[in-house]
Image: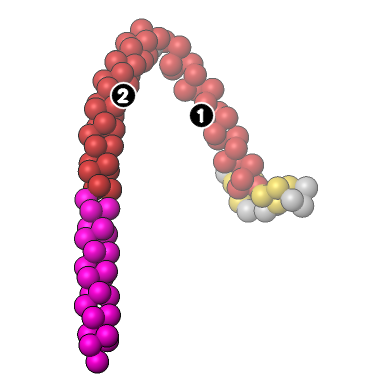
């Protein structure tokens, strides 16, 4: 591997890929730089965090409203399903009775 004119092996120590090592170093360097930049923007971050908390509370309230709505829909659907199954059972029982009567008459 040729990096900035330097000849580097593709693996370090036989088990760590040079690319992965460079990605890790880049990630750590990025975090250090990001930390320095974010320290200067503390008031902005506090304000953004406050807005996020307000949004989170609003969202949780909406989710509670929707949860209640969907629970009602679910209960109503289960009720209608049970009624439909009961009707089908009644129809099957009537058919059985009719078949029994026909059988007895033969």
- Label 1, label 2: how many angstroms apart (C-alpha)? 34 Å
Give the residue at mark 1.
Answer: 30
Name the spot of residue 83 as percent of width and height, x first: 23, 53
Q: Residue at x 28, y 48 (%)?
A: 78
Question: Which of these two is toward me, 7 or 103?
Answer: 103
Q: Which residues are magenta?
A: 80-106
Q: Are marks 1 and 2 in contact (CB under 8 Å)?
A: no
Q: Quadrant of residue 63?
A: top left
Question: Which of these two is toward me, 102 or 47?
Answer: 102
Name the spot of residue 40 as percent of width and height, x first: 41, 10
In the image, taking residue 71 as reference, residue 31 lies left or right, namely right
Crowding at mark 1 (Cα within 10 Å: few <14, some 14-19, many 20+)? few
In the image, taking residue 87 as reference, residue 21 lies left or right, namely right
Considering every residue shown, the one lying at the far top of the view is 43
Q: Secondary structure at mark 1?
A: helix
Vertical relation: 92 (above or below) 106: above
Asked whether 95 falls inside the magenta stretch, the response is yes
In the image, taking residue 50 as reference, residue 40 lies left or right, namely right
Q: Earlier in the sequence, mark 1 or mark 2?
A: 1
Vertical relation: 49 (above or below) 5: above
Residue 77 appearing in the image: yes
Q: Residue at x 55, y 35 (%)?
A: 26
């Amino acid at each position: 591997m040729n990096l900035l004119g330097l000849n580097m092996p593709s693996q370090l120590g036989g088990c760590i890929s040079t690319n992965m090592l460079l990605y890790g170093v880049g990630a750590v360097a990025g975090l250090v730089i990001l930390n320095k930049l974010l320290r200067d923007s503390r008031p902005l971050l506090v304000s953004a965090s406050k807005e996020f908390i307000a949004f989170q509370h609003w969202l949780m309230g909406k989710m509670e409203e929707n949860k209640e709505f969907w629970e009602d829909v679910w209960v109503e659907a289960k009720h209608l399903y049970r009624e439909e199954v009961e009707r089908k059972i009644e129809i099957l029982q009537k058919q059985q009775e009719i078949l029994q009567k026909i059988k007895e008459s033969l």
